[in-house]
Amino acid sequence: MADPASRVILSAPLKGWATRLDDVPDAVFAERMLGDGIAIDPLGSVLHAPCDGMVLTLHAAGHALTLRTREGAEILMHIGMDTVGLAGRGFSPLVREGEQVTRGAPLIAFDIDALAARAPSLVTPIIVTNPDRFSIVERCDECAVNVGDMLMILAARDDAPAGSASAFAEHSRSVTVPLAHGIHARPAARIGGAIKHLSADVALVSGERRGDARSAVALLALGIGYGETITIEAGGVEGAEAVATVAALIESGMGEGVNAAIPAARPGTQAPGFAMPIKMLPDGALRGVTAAPGLAIGTAFRLRIAEVVVADEADDALIEQRRIDDAIATVSARLSRRMEQADSTASGIMAAHLAFLDDPALRETAMRHIAAGESAGRGWQLAIAAQVAVLTGSGNARMMERVADLHDVEGQVLRALAGVAETAVALPPGCILIADDLLPSQLVGMDTDGIAGLCTARGGPTSHVAILAAGLGLPALVAMGAAIDTIPDGTPMILHADAGHVIVDPAPDLIASTRKQITARAAAKASAHAAAAQESRTRDGIRIEAFANLGSLADAQLAVANGAEGCGLLRTEFLFLERDAAPTAAEQTADYQAIAEALAGRPLIVRLLDIGGDKPAPYLAMPVEENPALGVRGIRVGLAHPDVLETQLRAILAVRPIGQCRIMVPMVSDLGELRAVRAVLDRLRIEMAVAEPVELGIMVETPAAALIADLLAAEADFLSIGTNDLTQYALAMDRGNPAVAGGVDGLHPAVLRLIAATCTAAAVAQRWTGVCGGLASDPLAVPILIGLGVTELSSTPALVPEIKALIRRLSVPACRDHAARALAAGSAAEVRALAGDFLEQVQP
């Protein structure tokens, strides 16, 4: 029987619902790999000390903390699941490691609403991590608890081990930690579990610090971070096996977001992870995901934006409601002014922000919270959080993009409430801007002339910031992880966005050679622009049409100035979104006619309306869908709303000259959809006395369309491949999810095989195949696409001259051989390595 003096009473550190560990949605906790305990589903936003003790460990991400009681019990508290990936966002530690605290003392404050929107679960385990020394003799679970209520009673075990002397390190090995968030609770538990059955004393050594590999707390106390080189030491009968086991487990990444910037520990091997390089990275290189291509030299400059402090409550609801209305009006007016000077991409993003600000449901939710006693700022935060929860629950790429916009709007209004002026950040000339993430409004509000490039820890390659960066000609890498947090301001950097990496503090000779490359690229770009008006043909005379993707009249004017030979994709959504009623046929015709005239007779391929549950129009009755990416979108919307489809077809048929406009059907997945649109088109041509033929083609964006391309090509006039959606559907990866952003690569062999099948089927039916997705703007992809049989490439308007210049350096037979090697590759990374070598051979 344990001495009562050795008992430890733990009180609830959070208000909420106490439950068993079995119900925690993470096997590490549910299977008690870290120890026994209780979990709390929290209602409060401050973690309190459950007992007197010392802060033994405080994780760098601020989400987890371990206390050691004076009796020696070690208590781990882990706020939420997978919250280590938030890299400290939403957490405010109130104590330091080594600090003595008393029961009930606040330990960590956290933004419960922000975490609810970003974490898969808020459930917080409270774990006794040394169960060999202390057992739980009484507990309160399946009940509501308040801070300070009794949660558990521990007793020292009579059979507790006396402790073991340090073993002689008979076996050792050094490894570099590839886990993006270092060795935190989950990896620590897995390391202990992997060697549990081995007869060996094992330790991890970091510098002069050593931790027992079987103790999760000891490993957490080491604070081992991403990229750190550590030593595994072991002694005993199975010491060698223990070292090999732990080394293999750490190098595998344990599914913890392996960062590709760390070279493999053993030559010739390749760590798991997305978009891994085939070639070794240069010294000092950190890998990211290409958001906008380019090459730049600059010095690091970190964007630091002060957070706005928001009061929780307010005394006068009427005053707070007037304040929120005034703040919304201020932000709306500023966005409207900026839209007048912005290009089509930036103005489209700002229009989306204005739509959020004008959303009555968002305002009403904020007002309801304010009426209940919340401050204006807090009410606005809660309203945004509710919308974010709805969008993130969809798991859809475009939904995720709108989440970023919501957070952007949230910050703009909070700053207006606080009276913080939206002043442009003073950027040093020639800087490479580093940020955890960038919001569209931040980039739009900057003087970007002095920026050499962008690097962000988070974000995805299809985010609005990525699109803006590409439009500004700024090389950009995203999804770089916590590694970029270690780069001090002023550090020289080479940003090689084409290759997907940055080199930190490069050698002078590398800087000199890179400057020569940049000069050569500038000369090649100038030459391409000088020859932009020339017809696009390969070196052996094969015609490849160089078109541009358009979203406005301004885009059309820029495309023509850059030598575009037509429009391969006119996004018509700009006419339908951010308004209360559908555009009339006359309104649509006026816009299409203006763009057709700007193209001066060049082909204009008009994509039929492509909206859905992820980007709805308020005047279309569309149910909320659990997964809009797989729901009613594209042509499914048009067929579900035949009046909208018919009005748009009438508008297109009214454009003169007849035949300049070609019609393209989005998101086709079976032949019946094409036939249904053809039937409406043929009927309207008769009604409108249009005798001339009007081409009707389809977009190949689903694997289904690629696999039945022979059937579709027999009845469609042309096929155009939308590689962005085709890639995410083929790879089952959400292109808006940063966790898999690096893997959503259109050069994956599976995607290329779908493109090859489409081109082959179209050629048999004597139809042409184009590409209007992101691959058409990727110089690495262009030779492969031509080799597969693509004869029309529609890129962003700014890139048309360089795409045409590249086409002129290619020969079709060489492209075919290159494409065949790409189809036989095993991964997108391997294809990109092949493509890089091929491109080097054809560069001027």
Image (cartoon, grey):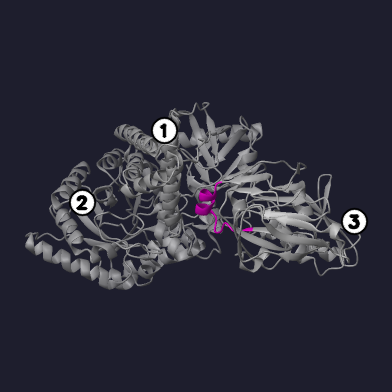
Whole-percent x and y of residue 678? 19, 67
Q: Secondary structure at mark 2?
A: loop
Whole-percent x and y of residue 269? 69, 59
Mark 1–mark 2 distance (CA, rounded to whole Å)? 31 Å
Q: Amino acid at mark 2?
A: Ala
Q: Secondary structure at mark 1?
A: helix
* 444 shown above or below 727: above
Q: Residues within 10 Å of mark 1 (few under 14, many from 20)?
A: many
Viewer-proximal residue, 589 or 446? 446
Residue corresponding to mark 3:
169
Q: Which numbered disc, 1 or 2, marks the residue closer to the eye? A: 1
Mark 2–mark 3 distance (CA, rounded to whole Å)? 75 Å
Residue 2 is a magenta residue: no
Whole-percent x and y of residue 766? 28, 66
Residue corresponding to mark 2:
581
Total marks shown come to 3
Residue corresponding to mark 1:
416
User: In the drawing, does residue 837 fall left or right of residue 174?
Assistant: left
Q: Which numbered disc, 2 or 3, marks the residue closer to the eye? A: 2
The numbered disc on residue 318 is none
Please tell me which residue is depicted at 23% across the width and 49% down the height of the picture. Answer: 580
Q: Amino acid at mark 3?
A: Ala
The residue range painted magenta reads 111-124
Whole-percent x and y of residue 749? 49, 63
Are the residues tagged 1 and 2 within 8 Å (C-beta)? no
The image quarter in which residue 268 lies: bottom right
Instruction: Answer yes or no: is residue 473 visible.
Output: no
